[in-house]
C-alpha cells in the first residue's frame, strides 16, 4: 500500500454542475410558490420573495458557477495533508478539513475551516468533476481524509459512518 506522502497532490477544479443548478432552481422556485400562499401582508411576502431570489442568485453564482470573489474555484490537497483553497479573486487560503465533510458516491461536500471564524464549503457532484478525479478524491478521503473520523475510531473502536 502506498503511503500518503508518495501520493501526488490532488488539484480539484470543479466545473458547472447542471444537477446542482437544477436543485437550486427547484428549491428556490418551490419556496417562492409557498411564499405566495402565506397569510402575510403583501409587503411581507414581497420582502420574503426578494430574500429568496437573492439567496438563489448567491447560490447559483457561488456554488454552481463559481463567479463570486469569495467562491472557491480550486482546492489543492497537498501530499503532506494540507489544503490550499483558491477563491474567485485569486486569493489563496490555508484550510483545514472539518469532520462535517460528507462523502458518498454521488456527492462530496468538502467543509473547511479557514482561520478562526471562517468556514468554506465546496459541493462536488459527479457532473462537475472528472470521474477519475472524483473517485480518487472519495477513496483518499475515506482512507486518510477526515481527521475527526479517525480520532473517533481510535477512541470508540467502531467503524466510520461514511455514506
Image (cartoon, rainbow, N blue to C red):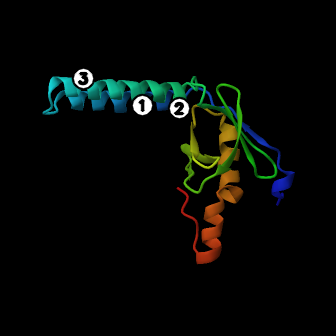
Classify mark 3: residues with Cα within 10 Å, few (<14), some (14-19) or many (20+).
some
Q: Position of residue 45 (x, y in %)?
A: 21, 27
User: Residue at the location (34% across, 28% down)?
Assistant: 51
Q: CA distance from mark 3 to mark 1?
A: 20 Å
In the drawing, what numbered circle is on residue 63? 2
Q: CA distance from mark 1 to mark 2?
A: 10 Å
Q: Position of residue 76 (x, y in %)?
A: 74, 40
- The quarter of the image holding the N terminus is bottom right
Rendered view: 66 above or below 123: above
Is residue 157 visible to the viewer in this orientation of the structure?
A: no
Residue of label 3: 46
Q: Earlier in the sequence, mark 3 or mark 2?
A: 3
Q: CA distance from mark 3 to mark 2?
A: 25 Å
Q: Are marks 3 and 1 in contact (CB under 8 Å)?
A: no
Classify mark 1: residues with Cα within 10 Å, few (<14), some (14-19) or many (20+).
some
User: Residue at the location (85% across, 54% down)?
Assistant: 5
In the drawing, what numbered circle is on residue 24? 1
Amino acid at each position: 500500500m502506498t503511503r500518503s506522502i508518495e501520493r501526488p497532490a490532488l488539484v480539484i477544479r470543479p466545473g458547472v454542475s447542471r444537477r446542482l443548478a437544477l436543485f437550486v432552481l427547484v428549491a428556490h422556485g418551490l419556496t417562492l410558490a409557498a411564499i405566495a400562499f402565506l397569510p402575510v401582508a403583501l409587503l411581507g411576502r414581497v420582502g420574503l420573495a426578494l430574500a429568496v431570489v437573492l439567496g438563489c442568485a448567491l447560490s447559483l453564482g457561488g456554488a454552481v458557477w463559481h463567479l463570486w470573489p469569495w467562491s472557491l474555484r480550486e482546492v489543492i490537497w497537498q501530499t503532506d495533508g494540507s489544503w490550499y483553497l483558491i477563491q474567485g479573486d485569486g486569493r489563496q487560503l490555508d484550510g483545514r478539513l472539518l469532520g462535517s465533510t460528507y462523502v458518498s458516491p454521488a456527492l462530496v461536500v468538502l467543509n473547511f475551516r479557514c482561520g478562526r471564524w471562517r468556514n468554506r464549503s465546496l459541493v462536488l457532484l459527479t457532473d462537475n468533476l472528472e470521474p477519475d478525479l472524483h473517485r480518487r478524491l472519495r477513496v483518499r478521503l475515506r482512507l486518510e481524509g477526515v481527521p475527526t473520523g479517525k480520532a473517533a475510531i481510535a477512541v470508540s473502536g467502531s467503524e466510520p459512518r461514511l455514506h
